[in-house]
Image: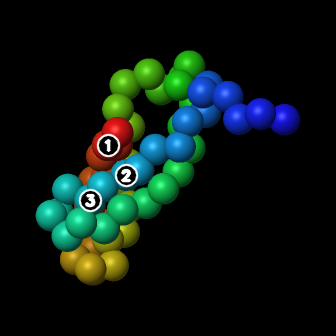
Amino acid sequence: MARNEVRPIVKLRSTAGTGYTYVTRKNRRNDPDRMVLRKFDPIARKHVDFREER
């Protein structure tokens, strides 16, 4: 089964400026805009917003 581009792999980069990233998949039909999730940044040692980068 080939990977299609309906669920692409995206990088989520921390807005705290630490450079920490998460890698996840998103459904482009449900979330066509850039994704923003609030997750834990172990370098900053707190929960911060992570924004999608391409």
Q: Quadrant of residue 2?
A: top right
Lower position in the chain sequence, tag 1 or tag 2: 2
The residue labelled by disc 1 is: 53
Q: Residues within 10 Å of mark 2 (few under 14, many from 20)?
A: many
Q: Give the camera-side residue of 49 and 9.
A: 9
Q: Which mark, residue 12?
A: 2
Amino acid type, mark 2: Leu
Name the residue located 43 percent from the left edge and 60 percent from the top edge.
22
Q: Does residue 4 appear anywhere in the picture?
A: yes
Q: Position of 7 compared to 44: left or right?
A: right
Relative image position of residue 17 (x, y in whole percent) = 15, 64
Circle 3 sits in a helix, a strand or a loop, which is it?
A: strand
Whether tag 1 and tag 2 are in contact, CB under 8 A, the answer is yes
In the displayed image of the protein, which residue is found farthest to the left?
17
Amino acid type of disc 3?
Answer: Ser
| Residue that label 3 marks | 14
